[in-house]
């Protein structure tokens, strides 16, 4: 579905495919209308007020405010009586991309340092930790631990990643231009990841990496890195925190004023024995 495509047009595309089952995990006004008009025989969605008309198989009416969205999505399987055997999220990197990343690491990174992956990605400007703050935190980590930073970037992130590298030229490496699967290969070579709320952050968690998520406009309870070895930081006391705004209308205080001590405490908690002191 294209972002700006009319719901009716999308619905009729689905109708042409003659699907038997549709599961709508969004259940927003747009997706509900698409589901309703799709002509699919069995349509599953949450029983949200004002939207449940679109579905003939209903899951919970709860919004999932107190648990992770991954857990909330599993509610859609209950009406189908599909058993849930595991809550683990897995991401498999193909051998080709694994080997490419391993060769790059061997060629360009020192073998005796902990590899800390830095993910400055973020689909909204408000979700991005400021590039100057990335440099501040990396320097604090460098003063305490024997690490090297692997700067992981995709479309829209290169400027921030390059800025970090230019300020830490002896202690960081930029990965080459990659697609998402290739980036996952590089993530897989990291010991620890620090990331904005983003798709690559979730890939890192699914690969079993300890991930520190940096949050501000979005809710880490519902969208944090979903793995037992990960964690997040958030400036909870800020009046506008978890605003869900794409652009900050203030001065990006949720990122700029996030205390260094708070970030380091969570980084050290999830890093544990992986961190080697200088």
Image (tube, grey):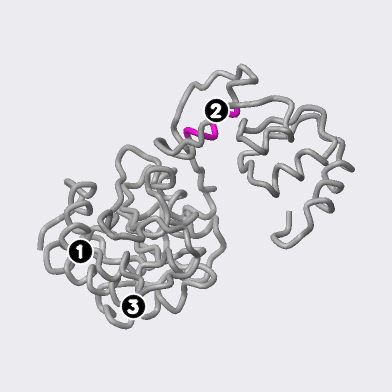
Q: Which mark is residue 75?
A: 2
Contact, CB < 8 Å: mark 3 with mark 2?
A: no
Question: From the viewer's perspective, is residue 62 above or below residue 202?
Answer: above
Q: Secondary structure at mark 1?
A: loop
Residue 254 position by quadrant: bottom left
> Which residue is tagged 1?
259
Q: Earlier in the sequence, mark 1 or mark 3?
A: 3
- Magenta-span inclusion, residue 55: no
Residue 252 visible (yes or no): yes
Q: Looking at the rendering, in which quadrant would you find the C terminus?
A: bottom left
Q: Residues within 10 Å of mark 1 (few under 14, many from 20)?
A: some
| Residue depicted at 86% across the width and 41% down the height | 15
Q: Which mark is residue 226?
A: none
Horizontally, residue 266 falls left or right of residue 144, namely right
- Please tell me whether mark 1 or mark 3 is closer to you in this view: 1
Q: Which residue is farthest front?
A: 50
> Which residue is tagged 3?
165
Q: Earlier in the sequence, mark 3 or mark 2?
A: 2
- Please tell me whether mark 3 or mark 2 is closer to you in this view: 2
Residue 191 visible (yes or no): no
């Amino acid at each position: 579905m294209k972002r700006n495509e009319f719901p009716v047009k999308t619905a009729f595309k689905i109708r042409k495919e003659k699907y038997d089952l549709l599961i709508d995990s969004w259940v927003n006004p747009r997706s509900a209308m698409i589901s309703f008009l799709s002509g699919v025989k069995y349509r599953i969605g949450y029983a949200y007020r004002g939207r449940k008309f679109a579905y003939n198989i209903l899951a919970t009416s709860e919004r999932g405010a107190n648990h992770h969205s991954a857990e909330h999505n599993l509610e859609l399987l209950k009406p189908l009586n599909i058993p849930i055997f595991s809550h683990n999220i897995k991401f498999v990197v193909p051998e080709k991309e694994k080997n490419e990343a391993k060769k790059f690491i061997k060629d360009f990174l020192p073998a005796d340092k902990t590899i800390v992956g830095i993910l400055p990605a973020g689909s909204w400007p408000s979700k991005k930790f400021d590039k100057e703050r990335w440099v501040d935190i990396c320097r604090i980590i460098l003063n305490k631990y024997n690490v090297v930073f692997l700067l992981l970037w995709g479309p829209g992130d290169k400027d921030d990643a390059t800025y970090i590298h230019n300020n830490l030229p002896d202690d960081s490496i930029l990965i080459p231009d990659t697609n998402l699967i290739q980036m996952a290969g590089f993530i897989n070579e990291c010991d620890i990841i620090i990331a904005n709320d983003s798709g690559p952050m979730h890939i890192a968690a699914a690969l079993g990496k300890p991930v520190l998520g940096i949050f501000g406009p979005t809710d880490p309870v519902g969208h944090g890195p979903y793995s037992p070895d990960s964690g997040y930081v958030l400036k909870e006391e800020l009046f506008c925190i978890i605003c869900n705004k794409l652009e900050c209308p203030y001065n990006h205080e949720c990122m700029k004023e996030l205390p260094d001590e708070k970030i380091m405490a969570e980084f050290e908690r999830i890093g544990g024995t992986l961190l080697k002191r200088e």
